Amino acid sequence: MKEHKPPHQHQADAGISPSLREYLSRRDIAALYDGYFGGMRLFEFDTQVLDVLFDKPGRLLDVGCGTGRHLLHFARRRFEVTGVDLSEHMIAVAHEKLAAEGLTARIVRTNFCDLEELSDESFDYAICMFSTLGMVSQRCNRSKALAEVHRVLVPGGTFVMHAHNRMHNLWNPEGLWRLLKSYLGALVGRCEAGDLSIDGYRGVSRMYLHSYTARELRGTISAAGMQMHKLLCLNESRGALIRSRPPANLVANGFIAIAHKPSNPA
């Protein structure tokens, strides 16, 4: 089902930095997306994790579905899938891929911070992968997005998200400098701790990305009303988990957080 109705202006603006607006508007980024990330080990590993967690077909929401890699995968598994994204070009690619395989999915073009077109308690599972939440600027907007996920999940539903690990930046000079600038900027009120500005990403100048500490990620999910079940620490290639004891959260090349919406009291 195609839904290309543009979002309301208040929705479209929330959490959208100038760099993300450029990213979303670029047709070439969408067209080359799958080829650019072809062979990324994270994309194989996060799918394996989701397959274990989502062992029974149900209603799945993909927040930031992009060109539809998870939509296609779970549609093949006979899930009822819905994607949300703001890029009309990414959505168009996703529809083309679904049609080529004779698969169906609902894709809604809207902002993650206001999923008003989606009903309360209408999904068994929700995902937000490949640091999509980190592309939303300002803590208040990221909190709104997670509150919306909580709203649309059924009691007992499962939420899984990927985030970049802020502490991973400590171990290389360029990353450390970005991190120091982030903390200095936070001290003078120009940004929030963990906000990064990455030059030249996919040809976008000063691409905004928020990176998380393990503690912040747990607190953010908890504040949205969900219960953290497990935090997976990714190894350097992001194709497996770090097997060492803590401080794995200081060296992990990202996290996969697994949470649940509490069940209604009996």
Image (spheres, helix red, strand yellow):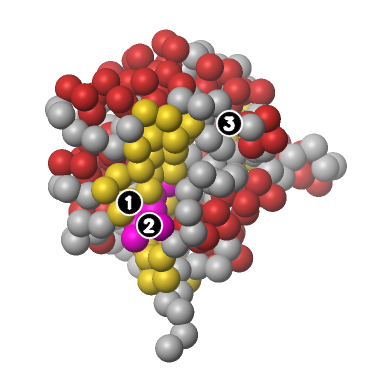
Q: Is residue 24 above or below residue 254?
A: above
Residue at left offset 58%, top offset 63%: 224
Name the residue at 24% across, 35% down.
Answer: 104
Does label 2 or label 3 sit earlier along the sequence? 3
**Mark carried by residue 123:** 2
Q: As displayed, is residue 137 above or below residue 57?
A: above
**To which quarter of the image does residue 11 belong?**
top right
Q: Residues within 10 Å of mark 3 (few under 14, many from 20)?
A: some
Q: According to the image, label 3 marks what residue?
A: 7
In the shown orientation, is residue 26 left or right of residue 105?
A: right
Which secondary structure lies at badge 3?
loop
The type of residue carrying mark 3 is: Pro
What residue did someone put label 1 on? 60
4 w.r.t. 119: above or below? above
Q: CA distance from mark 1 to mark 2?
A: 6 Å
Image location of residue 24, percent across then percent down: 52, 22
Mark 1 and 3 residues: CB-CB less than 8 Å, in contact?
A: no
Q: Nearer the viewer, residue 35 or 80?
A: 80
Q: Depth check: 183 or 22 in front?
A: 22
What residue range appears in magenta? Answer: 122-129
Image quadrant containing the C terminus? bottom left
Which tag, 1 or 3, sits closer to the chain's start? Answer: 3
Q: On the image, which quarter does residue 14 sit in?
A: top right
Is 57 in front, or is 6?
6
From this viewpoint, is residue 19 visible?
yes
Q: Is residue 128 magenta?
A: yes
What residue is drawn where x is 25% and y is 57%? 58
Q: Does dot 1 land on a helix, a strand or a loop?
A: strand
Q: Is residue 157 left or right of residue 191?
A: left
Quadrant (top left, top right, bottom left, bottom right) of the N terminus: top left
Name the side, left or right, on which 28 lies relative to 196. Answer: left
Amino acid type, label 1: Leu
